[in-house]
Structures are given as structure tokens and as C-alpha cells.
Image (tube, helix red, strand yellow):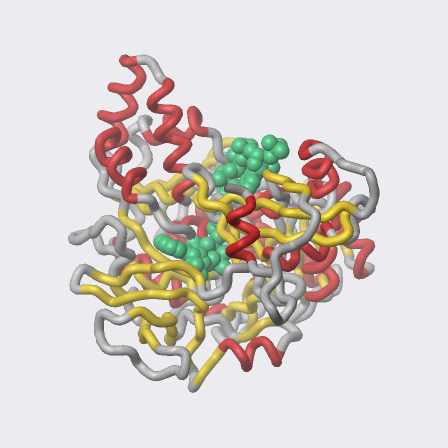
Amino acid sequence: MAALGSTLASFGESLSIVDRDGEQSYVALDGAANAVAAALVDAGARPGSVVASVCPAGRWWLAGTYGAWRAGAVLLPLEASHPPAELRHPVTDSGVTHVLCTAESAELANELASFTNAQIVDVREVVAAGSSEKLLEISDDGDAMIVYTSGTTGLPKGVVHTHRSLGAQCSAMVEAWAWTAADRIVCVLPLNHVHGLVNVTFTSLSVGAVLETPGHFDALETWERLASGDITVFMAVPTIYSRLVRAWLDADDETKARWSSRAASLRLMVSGSAALPVSTLEQWREISGHVLLERYGMTELGMVLGNTLDRRVPGHVGWPFPGVEVRIVSEDIVNVPDGDVGELLVRGTQVFSRYLNRPDATAESFVDGWFRTGDVAQQTPDGYRLLGRASVDIIKSGGEKVSALEIEEVFRTHPAIADCAVVGLPDEEWGERVAMAWIADSGDRPTDIEFRAWGKERLAPAKVPFDYLCISELPRNPMGKVTKAAVKELFG
Ligand code: MLC
Ligand code: AMP
């Protein structure tokens, strides 16, 4: 398998990226990546160095990523809109040695670099300087990328993928969804999660397709791109489809007709990262003529189960991707009879190598070489179904996985709060919305707006509760443990 990015030059002058700066060819991207690699090596990067990126989506982000790999480094993609307090943990935990930025993200890069005394490389500047040198062969076994993911315990864990596991993820999607160089996709997802990173960005560029990178999601802009006649493939989380439905319903009749007829010409539309409500699937079918292809994946695994180009069953997540094996087991890790409900286990080349610096957590998450997803699933004649998470403390809001325990830890440091419990409430738009019941420490009663502002200085936006309920006591079981089901009921 060719390492990701090693084939860029083979696509020559064909178009690779469309971003705010215009269009760029594959050969130009290849040259830019070499320049970044040379600059990183000059700045002391060595095989295994961890290089964080806060570049904006587009050519600078891509040159930085492929350049880091060509220098033998490991990429840590960060979301520049998150507060530094949220980014401190990934930067310090992974021991970042270099931070890639452009002028617009230089201030944040400086702050992050100060956490570990890292060097800053301005991608735009080093590409303009254009130097290049003989670069390392990328080894399939080498670490390629660290993505931080929330879990049931403590701070987020760094999921380490090798070039081999990322390459296997891309190849499986190329095969399953028939990607070719004739495809063109628009990336409206953030570049700190596998969905935007692997499914959209690395996979499209691995086949020589065109990648459009607006760098954010905006419903009207996205509709215009879907209706442009240029785009062949689109991928998003259910919240984005529900926003696109809302934008369509709000549009005038002429616009509705134009959007619908043009969007029908895409060859594939995919939904994933959270359960797709059948109602959204049906609305989207009426609006666009597309039956969304729903698939199931995870940061640690890439894409695991998916409906297929030929068969899509609403409410189901399909069958294993090429090269992926799955089992459903009982609590004592014995295969359940076909059709029974149990925990989904996964094995295959796509699986991550380890949680960074967490041999305990890595060991606990595998049993006999199978990864324990913590997702409850069922095999049916119409494909697999996902029935939720084993842990009530993992919440999915707008496709973002967040840990109730991590949010509670942060809010317990708020001066007005004596104790709190965070839950996910069912929500039509977000899938689940984060809510917090809290006990006051004094007469002080911050408003919801004040709580949200305080939270946003410390946490990623998806982790900041929308609802705050002041109560006198948290419901507990006889062992003294907070009963989250009872907390949810308090919100009605
Ligand atoms: C933004 N907000 C959120 C939020 N995103 N709140 C809860 N959950 C989220 N996910 C907050 C904002 O701070 C804002 O607060 C308010 O909600 C409205 O913001 P917005 O501007 O309307 O939101 P927007 O920026 O448009 O973001 C919505 C979104 C985004 C759906 C586009 O959340 C998103 O890109 N989600 C995708 C995440 C993703 O890629 N997941 C894949 C994980 S990988 P206020 O107070 O200012 O109003 C994975 C594996 C797999 O799961 O299978 O793929
Ligand atoms: P993350 O850790 O952010 O990669 O999120 C992975 C989790 O998202 C999985 O473990 C599932 O709980 C959830 N998920 C992903 N895709 C789907 C889907 N199609 N249906 C239901 N849940 C999903």
C-alpha cells in the first residue's frame, strides 16, 4: 500500500484543491509539501516528532500535513476555534515539538507552542521560500496521526494511527464507494475528526479527486455547491443534513426547485458519526431524491459498517467494510446468537495502534486482539443496527463525542457550583444536547448565558451545556452513585 500522500505528484497538473485562495494542482501541492518537510527538518523535526497544525482548511493545511509526514513526523490536527484551555491537554500530552500555522493562526500557534517550548513553522512562508531536500521514505508502521477523543474516564485520549491503518481506512472507502479521480467533494466538516480528515480529505486526495475546502459549514453556501453541478460526493453528520433540510424549507419555490433538481445529480451522499433519524432520511429523500447512505465508524477504527452503493436500509448501518471483521458479544465476551443484542467488537488493519501514553487504557480496550467499541449493536438480515452506547456518560452532540465526566470536572471548578451532573437529552437537531443539573455553592445564580460564556472559555463548543437546572440534591442510588437516568428525568 502506498503511504498517504506519496502519490500526489502522480496526478500531475490535475486539480487537487479549491480553497479561499483559488485552485491548486496536485503537482503544486506535492511541491508545497516538500517545502514544508524541508523546513520542518531544518527546524529540528525528527522521525516521530509530533507536529501540531492550526492551519486553516485548504492548501496550507494540506501542505503542512503531507509535509509533516514527509519529514517523518506525526500530525496532531487541532481545531483552531477551540479555546487554548481545551487545546493545552493534547499539546502537552503528545509533547508537540513544532506547530504549523499561517499568519492568521500565528497568535494561537504562539500560545500553544509556549506550552511545550515548540518551534513555529509558518507554512505559507516556507512554501514561498520553496526549498526542498531528499526526504525520508515513509514507513507503513510509523505513527502518522494523533486524534484526541473523549472517553468515559478522565481527559481525552490520543488515538494513534499509523500510515498503515490510515491507508487501510482510505482503501476500504475507495473500494466500497467506488471513488475515482473523476470525483469532487466539498469538505464542510472540521479537520480534527476522522470524518473530515480521513473520509473526506485523505480519501479524496488518495485517488486524485478534487477537494473543495470552504473551511466551515454554512447551509446556504453548501446548498449552492451541491446545486453547482460540480460536486459528485457529499458527506456530513445528521445535524448538517437536518440544517440543510431547514434551509430548503425556508427557501422560495424557485430556489427549492433548483437546489433539488441539481442535487439529484450527485452520485453519492453519505451520513455518519451519529444515528441518522429515519425522519431526516425521508425528508432528504423527498428533497434531493437521494437515499442517504448511512455508515458507522469511530476515531479508533475508521469506517466499520456501512450500507452499500446497491443497498441502503433506513435505520440500519449496513455491513462490514472491506478488510474489517466484527462480532457481537455478551458481557462475558461470548458471541451472542445471530439477532441478539450485545457489544460490537472490531478487528482489522484499520484499527489504531494505541492510546498515546496510556498502555492501561489500550490494554483494557482490547480483548484477544478485538477492539471493544462500547457500542450496543444487533445483526439483522437487513444489516447491522446500532442501539446506543453502553455508557450513559458518552454523549454525541452534532456528531461530536463528548464525555459527561470531563464536562463535570471543569464545571465543578466554577465558583457558584458545589456539584453537578451532565447528561445528554434527546434532541431533534443535535441528536443529543448536553444538559447540566447543578447544586449551588452560595446564593450566586449565574444565568444560562453566563454559564455558557464561562464554559466556552474552557471547553470546545460541543462540550458546553445548553441547559442548566439548579437543584438541591443530585439523585443517587444506594451506593451513592449519581443516577443519570433520574437526572435526565429532572429535565422533563
Ligand atoms: C457548535 N455548537 C455546538 C456544536 N457545534 N453545540 C453542541 N454540539 C455541537 N456539535 C454550539 C456553538 O458554539 C453555538 O453556541 C451553537 O452551538 C450554534 O452554533 P452554530 O454556529 O449553529 O454551529 P456550527 O458552528 O454551525 O456547528 C454545527 C456543526 C458542527 C453541526 C456544523 O457541530 C460540526 O461540524 N459537527 C461535526 C463534528 C464531526 O465532524 N464529527 C465527526 C466525529 S468522527 P452559541 O452559544 O454561540 O449559540 C466520528 C467517527 C465517525 O464520529 O463515524 O465519523
Ligand atoms: P468518535 O469517537 O467521535 O469517533 O465517535 C464514534 C461513535 O459515534 C461511535 O462509537 C458511535 O457511538 C457513534 N456513531 C458513529 N456513526 C454512527 C451511526 N451511523 N449511528 C449511530 N452511532 C454512530
> In x, y percent, where is residue 299?
48, 61
Location of residue 105 with respect to 224 vertically, above or below: below
Location of residue 4 with respect to 257 vertically, above or below: below
The residue most toward the bottom is: 368
> In x, y percent, where is residue 328?
32, 74
Location of residue 439 with respect to 48 vertically, above or below: above
Tell which of 364 and 70 is nearer to you: 364
Residue at position x 16%, y 64% from top? 381
> In x, y percent, where is residue 167?
42, 65
> In x, y percent, where is residue 93?
71, 65
Tell which of 203 and 413 is nearer to you: 413
The answer to whether residue 226 shows anywhere in this view is: yes
Q: Picture quarter containing residue 449?
A: top right
Residue at position x 64%, y 52% from top? 53
The quarter of the picture where the N terminus appears is bottom left
Residue at position x 43%, y 86% from top? 368
Residue at position x 80%, y 57% from top? 115
Tell which of 111 and 297 is nearer to you: 297
Using residue 468 as the reference point, say whether residue 159 is left or right of it: left
